[in-house]
């Protein structure tokens, strides 16, 4: 199980570092042609919706790294289902720029909502796991 915890941690850390590296390059205007910079910035904005989902995974992988394997296992099962669901919902959410009615709900809002909901549910899973583990130790003693 320790190997799976390390894999979770390394993948989420790599994605976060890549995201910050891309943002750092864009913010410093390291591009030489403005056309490339604008396309690069648009791609960062597009990828940002999906990379936003990895911030809480990174944080919770750090938290669960030091907890019991049962808690990590239940949280990772939830993450394996939630991440693809979030990516699919963010991908299929229509953009609000076109049409007669302007919608306030766009892919960015979907990503933010799904990330917040993920963080809340992850906290609940971890807290319930810690409480169960604590009380099971008390009963045994």
Image: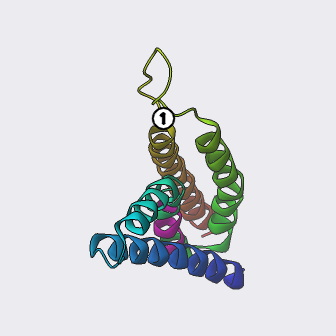
Residue in front for this viewpoint, 108 or 65: 108
The verdict on residue 94 being magenta is: no
Pinpoint residue 31: horizontal percent, then vertical percent: 36, 76
Outermost residue to the top: 100
Q: Residues within 10 Å of mark 1 (few under 14, many from 20)?
A: some
The verdict on residue 58 being magenta is: yes
Pinpoint residue 123: horizontal percent, then vertical percent: 49, 53
Pinpoint residue 71: horizontal percent, then vertical percent: 62, 65
Please give the name of the residue rendered at 62% of the width and 74% of the height, measured from the top-left corner: 8
**Quadrant of res 79:** bottom right
**Quadrant of res 20:** bottom left
- The mark total stands at 1
For the N terminus, give its image quadrant.
bottom right
Please give the name of the residue rendered at 62% of the width and 83% of the height, measured from the top-left corner: 6
Question: Can you say whether 35 is above or below 120 in the image?
Answer: below
Looking at the rendered structure, the secondary structure element under dot 1 is loop
Residue that numbered label 1 is attached to: 106
Question: Can you say whether 109 is above or below 123 in the image?
Answer: above
Q: How is the image coloured?
A: rainbow
User: From where the camera sits, is residue 66 visible?
Assistant: no
User: From where the camera sits, is residue 9 visible?
Assistant: yes
Please give the name of the residue rendered at 45% of the width and 71% of the height, measured from the top-left corner: 19
Residue in front for this viewpoint, 47 or 99: 99
Residue range corresponding to the magenta coloring: 56-62
Pinpoint residue 55: horizontal percent, then vertical percent: 46, 63
Q: Main secondary structure of the magenta part?
A: helix
């Amino acid at each position: 199980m320790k190997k799976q915890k390390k894999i979770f941690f390394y993948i989420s850390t790599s994605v976060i570092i890549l995201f910050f590296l891309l943002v750092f390059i864009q913010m410093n205007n390291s591009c030489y042609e403005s056309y490339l910079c604008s396309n690069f910035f648009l791609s960062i904005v597009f990828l940002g919706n999906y990379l936003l989902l990895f911030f809480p995974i990174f944080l919770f992988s750090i938290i669960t790294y030091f907890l019991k394997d049962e808690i990590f296992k239940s949280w990772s099962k939830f993450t394996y289902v939630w991440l693809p669901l979030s990516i699919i919902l963010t991908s299929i959410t229509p953009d609000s720029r076109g049409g007669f009615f302007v919608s306030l709900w766009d892919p960015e809002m979907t990503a933010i909502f799904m990330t917040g909901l993920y963080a809340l549910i992850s906290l609940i899973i971890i807290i319930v796991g810690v409480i169960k583990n604590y009380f099971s130790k008390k009963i045994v003693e």
